[in-house]
Structure formats: structure tokens, C-alpha cells
Image (tube, rainbow, N blue to C red):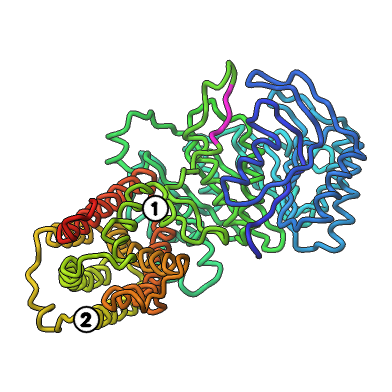
Amino acid sequence: MVGCPQVLTIAGSDSGGGAGIQADMKTFLALGTYGMSVITALTAQNTRGVQGVCAQDSAFVKMQFDSIVNDIRVDGIKIGMLANKELVHEIVNCLQAYKQTHTLTRIIVDPVMVSTSGSLLLSDDAIRNVVHDLLPLSDLLTPNLPETRQILHTAGIACEDEQNTLSWMMRAAKCIADLNGSNALIKGGHEPIGHQDLKEVLRHAGIAISLGSDAEDTNELCKTHGPFQWQTPNTVRHLYDATDRENAEIEQVLGASLYRSRGIDMFLVRDVNDMRVLKRNTDTKSSDLYTVDVLYECSKQLLTLYVKPTLSTTATHGTGCTLSSAICASQAHGHSLRVSIAYALQYIRQALHSGIEHLGKGPGPLNHGANVCIRGVPKGTSHCCSPFANQLIARSWELWHKYTRHPFIVRMGQGKLSKTAFLWFLRQDYIYLQHYARVWALAASDSASSKHDLRDYLVISKAALDETEMHLRVCERAGLSRKEVESTEESHATMAYTRYVMDQARGGLLPLLVSVASCALGYAEVGLWLKEQCDRHNVQIHLLDPIFASWIEEYAGDQYQNAAKSILEVLERAVATLEPNIEQTERLQKIWNSLMKVQRDLKLVCGMKLLPTANM
């Protein structure tokens, strides 16, 4: 898969924003895909219902589809509301032609044909076209219970309703999957199941489970009931078998326990009702109802049951649209079907938990942005590969400018700086370099550091030693012996600076990296700026006082600039990995700003040794 997965929804528009293509596009975005749409119908609707439907001309729908697929790669297609027979026929023709050259693109059909109240949204002819022509083109069908009954009726399949919904769903899933020779996911949200009924059905299938307030019997859990075997998640079996690795991922995503019988896998999502310590400390009233979604895969002849405690909320508008588009997005990321359904169900659960119940006067929609967080730092791009450093400097521009264009720096470039001030600066800067090396030792001991980071720290630590030697060379050219430099007493200003850096370095990896980057990038900026000023004003660096020229050439040179680049890359990679939120980023900005001030003040103290006529 190259770049961001690109997925297409073919569905109607919901002017209220909770379902249809609006729900699909929000879901695509939330799950990290690029969404596209073919609009089949416009609706006038709100939380209280649908006031009008305007189906699009079938020729224009085809034009939309062709416009997209003739130019843009499509990694997954979700099909929702098709308003009439003509639109069904047109979409079938489009997909038949498309699949001849695009056999790997997964097609998910959410057969919107029955309203919540039970009335048909499509004519009998259109429903027949969906069942006989569209379903065979799909890789997954996701009907709810009313739609399942309608499809079976239209297909002439005898699958009589039973008193127990789950038993019927399990048989119906296989019947519907056989229609397209692929897969069917029957959604059970319309008819939650009581926990005693659920246990009874599963017991007949060879699965014994413990739910909610049931008193678990450890011996019971360890028994084998016929073909049934209870399995705990995250055991060593997941390291070897591909199927077991898939099961382990589903368990992890959903927070579920896996139960298996012959031809049946059941994932039971655990929640507060299974955890006495949490249940005792929650205000939420527990429910004995469970929602079950049933998947049947023809190729495996396997039933998979996703069992979740039913959430008590009225904000359910758009749940079906959202689930199918979430599965489409997850498959486009390369996940298997069963894992994609797990990711989609977890996304739905988060969206339901924070649903927008009071949007209007009727049932509200899911909160599609529930798992979308505002980033503290933008992602790096080819246009800005150092977004965090860019943000730090941009938000402290005045401080940055005062630090990197300090009169001490300017006078150095002019050759007018007091040598006494410069020699004092060189000796104090050497002391800082000793602390600088210690900071990288702290970085290597941080638990957030990866093996890749440790290799970088070794490289940077060596660069720090090289910089120390480089600094001593500059000092020697200025007439300071190694012995004189190494015997320098640390000034109060330097002590304040170095201790602040060390204190921040003990606060975690990011504060540490921000602390060292403020100095490394600042010196790199100063070196480049001074060399640029000399070039701009036709001042030959070698004509400056040798002690100034040596410092500029060293810090503008490749050796130091490459070392600063390495630190910059480590900083940006750490931020991309740890993803600090806005509050954390603000704290890091304060550290950066404080270091700008401390380094400026250090230059100010150096400047006290400027010629008396200097303008500070």
C-alpha cells in the first residue's frame, strides 16, 4: 500500500450529518484514510426523520464514479443507499466493469432498504436487483435484522424466525453469505439479547461462558464441554500460528475473551460489569443486555460472534453506515476481515460512548470524532521535515532573535568584540560542554529511548566529544592553553544555565532533547548567520581577528552543522513517536523559552566584558 489508503463511498447524503456519506467521510478521516464519494441521492432530514429524498440521475452517478476511478487509486468501496432500481442497475454495471481490472479492491455493501420504523425504502424491483445483481459483486454484506429478513424473503430462502434471535442470526448469516459466495455480517443492534438467553444459546453450541454478575467457577472455566475449549488471551500460542495471531489481535483491540467451538469463534467484550472493583465505583447502571454481530465466512465455513454489552444511549443515528465504512477503512489499511470488523466495532463503541444525544429534538448521531485528538505538533512533511523545531522557534521568535543576534554575536562578526569578553566566553562554554556530554548519558538511560535512539546517542556523544576538541582548538588559537581552559571556575551565570539544563534533562526524554537542542540549534544558527553576514558584506573571514574567524569557521563548518542536524533528527523522531498533546507541547515550549532567556543572559554577562563604549 503506497501512502494513505484511499476509499470510496457510494451512498446518499444526510443533510443532518449523522448518516450517509457525511458519516462515511467522517469515519474515513477518523480512521486514517482519504475519503471520496459518489452521491446517489440527496435527502432532507434531521434528528426527527426524513422529510424528502431526491434521487440523482443515474447517468450523473456513473459520471461521478468514472471520474474517480479513471484518475485515483481506490483501495476499498463501501456502498450504502441506492435510491431506486435505475441507480442499482447503474452501480452494478459500474462495478462489473471496474472489477475486471481491479480484482483486489474490497467491496462492502450496506443494503439500506428498510427504515427504522420497518417501512421499505426501496421498491420490490430495486430490492430484487440488489439481491440478485449487487450482492454477488460484494466481498462483505452488512445487513441489520430487518434487512436480513427482507433479503431472505426476496431471495426465496426459507429461514424461519425463531423465538431466539441469535440462533436465527447464525443460520441467516450462512444463508446470506451463500448468496454472494463470500461473507455476511448480520448486525444485531436492533434486538439486544438478555444474558440468560445468550448463555443458553451458546451452551447449545458448546460454549459455556461467564457474564457480568455471574459467579465464575474457575474449575468450570477449565473444563472442556464437548468440542468447546476456553482459551485465555495473550498466551504463547499467538506467537506461532497465523490464525492465533489474528485472534490475539482481535482480543487486544476489543478487550475481549475468545471462546471456541466447532466452526464457531466467539469474542466476548469485557466491560465494567465484569470488573467488580470498577462496577462498584461507577455511576453507570449495569445492563443485562448484549448486542451480538454474527459474521459468516464462506471460504472458512466459520461463524464469528462479536458479543458486546449493550450501551444505553439514544445517540445511535448512523450506526450502520458508520460500521460498514469503518470496516472498509480498516481493510484498506491491510487488516484481515475479522480484524477489520474488530477495529470498526471498537471505533463504533467509542463513538457511541460519546454520542451527541441532544443535537436536535430526536435521536442524535454518534460522535465520529471521539478518537480524533488535536495534535500538539503537526506531522512532518516534505515541505517541513522539522515541524517541532519550527514550532518552537516560531513561537519564541523574539527570544530566538535576541539570543542568536545578541550584540555579543553581532560584534564578534564585526571584529569589534572585546577579546577579554570572548576569552571568558570560550572558557565558560567549555564548562557547558562537559555538562552537555552528561545529558546524553541521561538520554541513553531513559526508558522511552529505542535501540535506534541509543545508536544515535552514541553518535551524538562522540560528536559532543569532537565538539569539545574543536572548542579546545579554538581556545588554543586564541592563546588559551588546555590547562587554562580546564582549570576555569564556573561562573554563576554558567552554573544557572547548566543546572537548569540538567534539571530539565531529568524530567523525561522530550524535556531533555529540547534542552540540548536549544543550544545545538542556536549555535548552528549563529555560525551560519555570521558566515552569511561576512559573505554578504564581502568581509573575508580570514581578515577578521583569527580568534573570531576560527570560531565562525568551526561552527559554520560541516562537522558542527552535521552534529546539529543529528540532534534535530533525534528530536523530531522522538516527538513523532511520543506524540505530545497540546498541554505537553506548551510545557516543552516554556522550557525552550526559558533556555532562550538563560542563554541570552549568559551572553549578557559575557557582554559586561565588552569595551566600555559598547551599546547593550
Q: Residue 375 in the image: x percent, y percent?
A: 45, 47
Give the residue at x 88% y 50%.
94
The Cα–Cα distance between marks 2 and 1, rounded to whole angstroms, is 29 Å
Q: Is residue 90 left or right of residue 36?
A: right
Q: Secondary structure at mark 2?
A: helix
Vertical comparison of 522 with 7: above or below: below
Q: Is residue 79 left or right of residue 221?
A: right
Q: Can see residue 431?
A: no
Q: Residue furthest top?
A: 361
Q: Report the quarter where the N terminus lies.
A: bottom right
**Three-letter amino acid code of the residue under disc 2:** Leu
Q: Nearer the viewer, residue 114 or 262?
A: 114
Residue range (magenta): 363-367
Vertical comparison of 500 with 213: above or below: below
Among the two numbered marks 2 and 1 on one chain, the one whose residue lies closer to the N terminus: 1
**Three-letter amino acid code of the residue under disc 1:** Ile
Q: Residue 82 in the image: x percent, y percent?
A: 81, 37
Q: In the rendered structure, are the residues bearing label 2 and label 1 in contact, judged by CB atoms less than 8 Å apart?
A: no
Q: Can see residue 531?
A: yes
Dot 1 corresponds to which residue? Answer: 393
Residue 192 falls in image quadrant: top right
Q: Secondary structure at mark 1?
A: helix
- Is 74 in the magenta? no
Give the residue at x 20% y 66%.
418
Q: Nearer the viewer, residue 35 or 267?
A: 35
Q: Is residue 442 left or right of residue 580?
A: left
Q: Nearer the viewer, residue 323 or 517?
A: 517
Dot 2 corresponds to which residue? Answer: 472
Q: Is residue 601 left or right of residue 569?
A: left
Q: Residue 612 in the image: x percent, y percent?
A: 16, 56
Residue 56 falls in image quadrant: top right
